Amino acid sequence: MAYSAARWRELSPELPAACSRLVADLRDLKDASGLTLTELARATAISKSSWERYLNGKQFPPRHAVQALCRTARRGEGPLLAQWALADAAWSGRGRTGSSARPSGDRTAPASGTGPAVLGSPSPPPPPPTPVSRARRALLAASALIDERPVGTAAGVLLLCAAMVVPAALVHASRSTAARPAARPPVCRLQSCEGRNPRTTACEDPVTTASHTAADGTRLEIRLSPSCRAGWVRARPTHPGFRIEITGPGGHPQSVVGTARPAGGEATMTAMTTMIAAPRPEKLRVCYHPSLGHPGRECFTGTG
């Protein structure tokens, strides 16, 4: 079968005749299919670079490559496989005498990988085709596509990843929002909070706006709930018998009195006043009165 030297690289004269005829037949079959090397690689799941080596006589084609080309070109594979068996014997040296050697210009080991047989012994049957898994075919096809269109393929991969990640993130966010309990609305605001215990209301977002440490070591803090717009005093006194009072413009004074030592005789406990309206938190004023054994008072305002 003839082939066009203008389209294909001239084969090495050291290539065995059976191998040259096989390569020429493969070239003709490829040309008859009308496929480019890239299209042939995609259709057969064999890389473009491998087909370039097979069709230029640089590497002996494996049996499954010949079968794949026949299937792609829709030709019967029997005659070409018979030609392949002769070429395989010539390439590997099985069809030559012991003094013969493979051409010195060959750079690739023969496909069969066996040495010359003893004279007169029958040639072994050709090796069975190597199975190609679906995953390997997909990887080879993807490799050929990346070689042909690297930028477009990369963009497609990024879009595919985004299409998988974004819906998952949205589902996760919706589940997190549904699982999160809704915040309770405050049960009071400004004057309606006065006299209430801050522990029993929904004013659960307090911040400390000012603090002071008294001479006897008692720590006092003005606590404010922005949602309720009400404040109170939290104190950690060092002894019983104290009194704390918080006042503000337009509000009724709120206070707490410590009259007994906590259980166990420990000197440290936490006390809280009831709530007072705080439309202007900086105007809140706290006065601390120690016990009878510590006369005097200490005052500070909501500005610290």
Image (cartoon, rainbow, N blue to C red):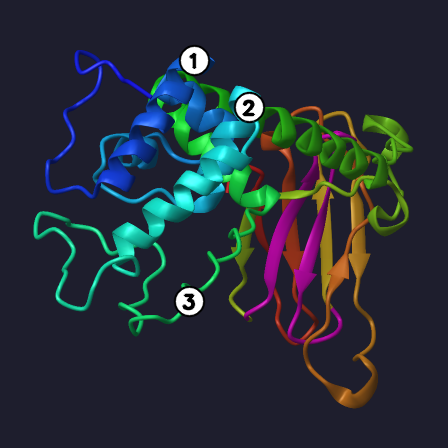
Answer with left or right where residue 232 lies relative to residue 104: right
Please tell me whether mark 3 or mark 2 is closer to you in this view.
3
Answer with left or right where residue 144 lies relative to residue 201: left
Q: Height in image: 192 above or below 115?
A: above
- Kind of element beneath mark 3: loop
- Kind of element beneath mark 1: helix
Amino acid type shown at disc 2:
Arg
Q: Is residue 220 magenta?
A: yes
Q: Is residue 266 magenta?
A: no
- Find the magenta span and give its range: 217-241
Residue 191 marker? none
Disc 1 + disc 2, Cβ < 8 Å: yes
Question: Could you say which is closer to the camera, residue 27 or residue 216?
Answer: 27
Answer with left or right where residue 61 lies relative to residue 290: left
Residue 122 marker? 3
Q: Where is mark 1, residue-wise?
A: 32
Amino acid type shown at disc 1:
Ala
Q: Where is mark 2, residue-wise?
A: 75
Nearest to N terminus: mark 3 or mark 1:
1
Residue at the image point whose x is 29% and y is 32% from the top: 21
